[in-house]
């Protein structure tokens, strides 16, 4: 297998893209954490547990999860 070095400019562009991706991943994690914080506050307000309900993001309604037989 033959190896060939890449252009220095290409290397810098790839590194920049990787850094941009890392920043986007951190921002996405912050957004998800804020969403979860808001949802937990709403679950507390409604006096229900996170495990028993799921959020329908199309209608923004909480839907009770079906319990298994024997639960």
Image (cartoon, rainbow, N blue to C red):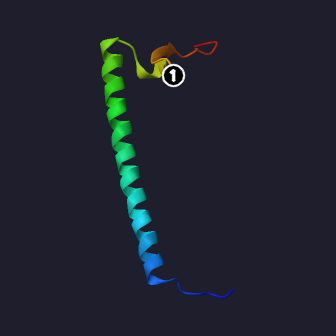
Q: Nearer the viewer, residue 11 or 40?
A: 11
Q: Is 32 situated left or right of 57 in this image?
A: left
Percent coordinates x, y for residue 16 in the rendering:
39, 67
Q: Tell me the quadrant of the picture where the N terminus can be found.
A: bottom right
Residue 22: image location, x then y, percent: 39, 57
Who's the residue at 51% across and 22% down the image? Answer: 58
Q: Could you say whether the residue bearing mark 1 is in a helix, strand or loop?
A: loop
68 or 66: which is nearer to us? 66
Query: Could you say which is closer to the camera, residue 38 or residue 17?
Result: 17
Does residue 44 sit above or below 5 in this rendering? above
16 up-or-down from 60: above or below: below
- Reading the image, the residue beneath label 1 is 58
Residue 28 on image: x %, y % = 39, 44
Which quarter shows the C terminus?
top right
Name the side, left or right, on which 67 lies relative to 51: right
Q: Residue at x 45, y 18 (%)?
A: 60
């Amino acid at each position: 297998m033959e190896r060939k070095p890449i252009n220095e400019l290409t290397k810098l562009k790839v590194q920049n893209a990787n850094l941009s991706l890392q920043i986007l991943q951190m921002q996405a994690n912050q957004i998800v954490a804020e969403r979860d914080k808001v949802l937990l506050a709403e679950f507390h307000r409604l006096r229900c547990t996170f495990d028993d309900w799921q959020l329908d993001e199309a209608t923004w309604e909480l839907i009770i999860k079906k319990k298994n037989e024997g639960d």
